[in-house]
Image (spheres, grey):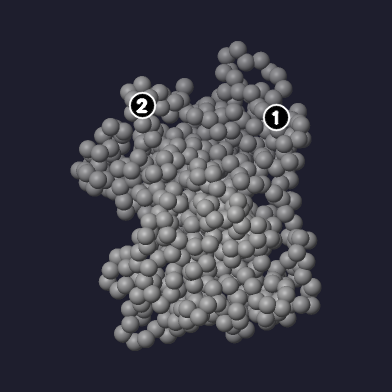
Amino acid sequence: LTNLAEAAPGGGGAAAPPLATATASAASPERPAARGALDGSLEAALRVAVPGEAPGFVMASFANSALNDHLVNFVLCAVRARAPFVIGAVDQAAFTMLSARRDAPTYVTPMAKEGASLDGSNQHSSGSWKRFAGMRTGEVLRMVRLGYSVLHTDIDVVWLRSPEPYLMCSGEASRPGGEHGPGSRFECGPLLSADVAVSSDNMSPGRDTEGRASYSAGGTFNTGILFLRPTVKGRAFAEEWHANVVSPPPGSRYVSLTSDQQVFNHMMRKPRQWPGVDAPHGSAVMREAWDGGRVTLGSLPLALFLNGHGYFVQRADLRLKVSPFAVHATYSLDNHDGVAKRQRFREAGLWLADGEEYFRGRFLALNASVPPAVAAALGAARSAGQSPNHIGVHAAALRGYLAELRDALALARALRRTLVLPRWTCWCDRMWSGSDDIFHFGCMYPGSQDGKFVPFACPMDHVLSPAAWAKAEVDYRDAAILDQPQLRASGAVVDVGLEPRPGWTRKAGSLPLGTSAAEARELLKPLAATPVLRLPHARGLLCSIDDDAAFNSLADRLLRIPTWCAKCFQPCSKELAGWLPAEEIRRGGGWDKMSYCMKVDVPPKFDAGGACSLNVQP
């Protein structure tokens, strides 16, 4: 998350099964701090975060009040993980909010003291971002100078466990037989030689686990999780890193760079070479980093410090049977902002910042199901001995999801209930941009295909735009809410039966297919007090609704697939012919061209004259 991005209201979504689902209040009693101990200085915050006479390990993050919800989530997760941390408040409002809590060691950064006005931009080329990047590298340097081992972390990182035992190679975990002891899969001893260790934007946690630094060297280093030790070399690097961000030497290769991450990557690599740094296969550290070896650079294992694609899409932690320390919300789609990242965390059960009121109310849940067209396509692929993981199946699934969502959302509005989105299944990944050939890699993001994770549980931003729903101020929840204890109690959820109109007889909790919103409202009145009504599907559910004009306008904005584009390895008319009809390839601009953008029509509108308008053909 860009620590300067503007936060916006929004709601839940659909996703992978949660690692842990918890409701947390705005304060946590696990690690109380005396309110008077925080006087706005860095030194006071560090004393609260790391009690004792000697400096030790500490995590450091920075954000302003535009990201208050992410700040609260960061604090609650870090406290639950029992990881020592400080937060540099980038404006006075953030310091006031955090210092009022009992669990958030915080201080006033130079930007906050100056009353700096931030433009809210998350673009690396913006003036705000450059100033922020210079400030945070300077603050990390201050902590390293004070003798602390500093793990810099972006605010859009959820900490599941404390990384201190691994990074400091201390405690039971480092001993023989321990999780990170000698001979273990992620042995901590070799990383002790690293003055600096960094996370990665690479796509394969599996290849990273095998190759370690040799694999990490070939990708982009991500300073959103960056560890610096207060060694002589570590301090020297922190000094020069900060200097190259705020005042690069004239004519140097750092002058045109716009972020601390770009400067870090350039510093660590030999000029005009790629990757410009390397390591033996399986090594924890790289050779000749920063001017031929002025620092020993280590790689933070991707499986333990997971990026957004590795966790939210691949669920590499489950496949590799590891318990990660952190999840960094990179590779979020839509607007890549606070709304998109909050959505990813919520649907994975990693968002603790919602109050109890978020879980109260009456809900209409749409159950996940496989549309008949998709079931037929899956059967045909298996009968032919082909993989069903391709763009044809995925496009059919998205059409079906939107069609069902039309009726589920309309019924939720008619019943005055909040819609709970299902955990949809995706048969093709979605890329950050359409600049590569995903078809050539089994419909998986290039570089991640060894994970063989398709099909997978779709994050919401693979099907819908969280930003569009937030802008429309349409309240909704993600499927993870149904894992809450209060909604798992007996009688909290009632499954609504759907039956064809011919032969249907009126009974409690049952609707005829092709009903109207008014009829459905009347039939479900006896269940008005039930917290959750759950639909098995919504195919052919509604014929008509009361507010067709208003709803049609709303649906036209909300029920749209986000932009989905990819390159073709050969002309798309040839590469996609086995999966898509020729006309669909033409619509996507791929006929005799080398790129394709999927077109999925919005569901049919409800008829203004009251005629029956089903979401599927009978």
Q: Residue at x 53, y 52 (%)?
A: 184
Viewer can see residue 2: no
Horizontally, is 301 left or right of 8 in the view? left
Q: CA distance from mark 1 to mark 2?
A: 36 Å
362 left or right of 333 in image:
right
Please state which amino acid type lies under the numbered disc 1: Val
Above or below for 565 versus 123 = above
The residue at 30%/37% (across/down) is 584
Identify the secondary structure beneath mark 2. helix
Towards the viewer: 167 or 522: 167
Q: In the image, residue 97 lies at what x, y percent?
A: 70, 70
Establish if 71 lies above or below 481: below
Residue at 74%, 56% (x, y): give it. 25
Foreground residue among 342 and 60: 60
> Could you say where residue 36 lies in the image, as x and y percent from the top left?
79, 77
Q: Are marks 1 and 2 in contact (CB under 8 Å)?
A: no
Q: Quadrant of residue 495?
A: top right
Q: Nearer the viewer, residue 270 or 394?
A: 270
Q: Which mark is residue 231?
A: none
Residue 240 appears at what percent x and percent y?
44, 82
Q: Which residue is mark 1?
A: 494
Q: Judge depth for marks 1 and 2 and give the one in front.
A: 2
In the displayed structure, 423 sits above or below 323; it is: above
Horizontal side of 72 relative to 347 (left or right) equals right
What is the tally of numbered marks visible in this picture? 2
- Callout 1: 10 Å neighbours few (<14), some, many (20+)? some
Q: Which residue is mark 2?
A: 381
Whole-percent x, y for residue 312 in the image: 51, 48
